[in-house]
Amino acid sequence: MKPIVVDYRNRTISLSSAFEKKAFTPGTAEYAQLQSVRVDFPDFRLSTREFKTNTKQDRHKGLTYKFMREYITAHENAPSPVLEVLEDMIGTSKGHSLGKRYPTIKAWFLNRYPAYAEFGMTADELAKWRESQKQEEKVTELTSPDASTDEAKEEKPAA
């Protein structure tokens, strides 16, 4: 990656953040290099390049089934019913594709324990995460079967 990029169209000199730190210290080689570029392009303004961050990075890398069990045991007053739900989900997931098993259980766990899910997030990340959770809840409500319609189907006599 280049430490200095001259953008003729926008009339800017873009610096990498590491280069910028060194370039503003007189006497360094980076300082001399920046001054040389500024002599060539005196009307151009300086800017620091911003790098895209991976917003979909996995913040819960150590979240295993074993850890979920330990967390539930430590944080629930009556862990047995919640552990039964977890074990039931794990058992049920074995009949589904590998790509759906863990993510579904992980989402359930993070929804049930938002304090764990929110740990270490910045305010912006937290707001985005909460918004995505609200959208997921709406989708779940729309796609989940209604129990009353299932009962109505069972009560109708076969023709």
Image (cartoon, rainbow, N blue to C red):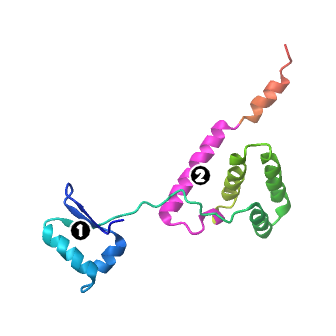
Using residue 17 as the reference point, say whether residue 77 is left or right of it. Answer: right
Q: Does the segment drawn in magenta span residue 158?
A: no
Which residue position holds label 1? Answer: 46
Q: Is residue 7 above or below residue 140?
A: below
Disc 2 residue crowd, few under 14, some 14–19, many 20+, Cα 10 Å = some
Quadrant of image for the N terminus: bottom left
Which span of residues is magenta-colored?
A: 116-144
Judging depth in this view, the residue of 42 and 124 nearest the camera is 42
Q: Residue at x 64, y 64 (%)?
A: 61
Q: For the residue labelled by badge 2, is the local secondary structure a helix, a strand or a loop?
A: helix
Q: Earlier in the sequence, mark 1 or mark 2?
A: 1
Q: Does the segment drawn in magenta span residue 138?
A: yes
Q: Is residue 128 above or below residue 26?
A: above
Using residue 142 as the reference point, say whether residue 124 is left or right of it. Answer: left
The answer to whether residue 100 of the structure is visible from this angle is yes
Q: Quadrant of residue 39?
A: bottom left
Which residue position holds label 2? Answer: 133
Chief secondary structure of the magenta span? helix
Q: Residue at x 76, y 43 (%)?
A: 96
Quadrant of image for the C terminus: top right
* Location of residue 158 in the rendering, given as x and y in whole percent from the top left corner: 86, 16
* Location of residue 47 in the rendering, given as x and y in whole percent from the top left corner: 27, 66
* Location of residue 13 in the rendering, given as x and y in whole percent from the top left corner: 23, 65
Q: Quadrant of residue 16?
A: bottom left
